[in-house]
Image: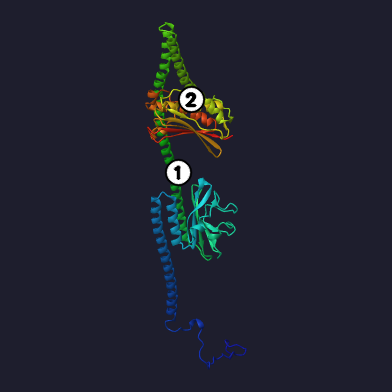
Amino acid sequence: MNDPNQSSGPKSIPSTTKASSGPKQVPPAQAQRPPGTEMLAELMQAQRQLTQSMHETRDLRARLSRRSHQMQVLQQVSEILAATSKAGQVVSVVLDVLAQEFHCQRAVVWTLEDEGVGYVPKDGTGLTRTEWSPLRLPAPNPFPDTPLVLFQSQWLDPSCDGSTLGALRGTNGAQLFFIPFEHQLLLLGFAILVLPTDRKWEEEDLDSISILQRQAAISLYNAWLFRDLSQQRDALQRQAVELERVNDALREADQLKSEFLALTSHELRTPLTGILGFTRLVMDGLYDDAEEMRSMLQDSYSSGQHLLGLLNDILDLAKIESGKLEVHPEPLSLAALVQEVKPIAEAYPRRTGVEVFWPDLSDIPDVVVDPSLLKQVLLNLLSNAFKFTKVGSVTLEVERHPGIITLLVVDTGIGVSHESQARLFQKFAQAEGGHSREFGGTGLGLVICKHLMEMMGGTISLASEGLGKGSTLRITMSIA
């Protein structure tokens, strides 16, 4: 009998696995490494990272040290700048910091000067004074031909300065670095550094320069204000001194004017009293004969002439000061004028024994003056000389100089002290001394002569060696 479970087809023969004759292959992922290889690789990686960290730490420490040093320097600079009020000291300090801390080859610092119209080099390093002192630049823009942000530190293009900064740039093609000192939108100055072409700024260097810029700008602004205030203070002091001098002169003039008015009142009253007295005597017939009456009338006439002279002095001065006196210069012969003056002057009253000497004017050229005014001046000077000369002589002399003629009235009279000579040509000056009371007069004669000579283009001056040593009055006129 057949088995129902058996198949009717051929039977499969199971395959048999044969053993390999070579070594058994192990997958790569399962390859075994030498002991410690992974640990060595990790150590080498850690060493590289540590070395890199050490380098970074060293660089950071160096930068930190430099930064700390710069901050210390800037702190010291800040204290120095805060204690100074002079722009020159500010510039010197800033220049030292730039040269020492940033190792620039050459550098110059400019400040705003010349009433704000130009930048003047104040100090330099690496160059002689004769090299950097001519490097003036215009304001408000020192480089007007080149677009430039003035308030920003930057490298200067070689074309921006042209030949102006040639001495600073040199022949080696060095770069120029511009550092402005700006405060309240005002460029108070700037520094230009000469640096090697390969120089690159670190961030901390730029930060330090920025801090230095602000400190320098504020210090320059303060120095500028201090200088302006100092100038105003000096101007006020000068004005105060001048005002005090004017006040003293006004007080002196007021005192002299008061004395002049009192003296003039006396001088006017004296001849007027004489005129009235002699006239009354004649009217009342209180005289013995015609000769005595004539003498009284002569004295009255002399008093009237004296009174007229006093009034003329006052009126002449008033006319001169009001600008109403007219001058008509023309060529004039001095010889002819002296011939007119001579008889009038010799008739003036003078002390007994006082001699008069006249010059020879035959070879003297004509002068350009107003004849009537020069005659008035000359007669006044001769009258004064006679009045103040008790013994000796009065001499008229002439000198010729290039373009001018000088007349000198020389007397051997009472002279003038050195203190009084300075104010002799001032109004009412004679009233200060006792001369008016002793010799009479208003003290206006020399003042009038001074004005008249100046109006004719001439001069007048006085020289005296002192009291009792005589005096010399000198007037100058232009040759025709």
Image quarter (top left, top right, bottom left or bottom right) of the N terminus: bottom right
Residue at image x 58%, y 60%? 158
Residue at image mark 1: 228
Out of 247 and 146, give the one closest to the viewer.
Answer: 247
Out of 136 and 320, give the one closest to the viewer.
Answer: 320
Q: Quadrant of residue 471?
A: top left
Residue furthest right as drawn: 9
The amino acid beneath tag 2 is Ala
Reply above or below: 287 against 84.
above
Where is residue 434 shown, x and y percent of the image? 37, 26
- Residue 427 visible? The answer is no
The amino acid beneath tag 1 is Asp
Where is residue 386 shown, x and y percent of the image? 43, 26
Residue at image mark 2: 345
Reply above or below: 308 against 28.
above
Where is residue 326 shown, x and y percent of the image? 56, 25
Where is residue 247 shown, x and y percent of the image? 40, 31
Q: Disc 2 and disc 1: Cα gap in Å? A: 62 Å
Residue at image x 48%, y 25%? 345
Residue furthest bottom as drawn: 21
Helix, strand or loop at disc 1?
Answer: helix
Reply above or below: 7 against 357.
below
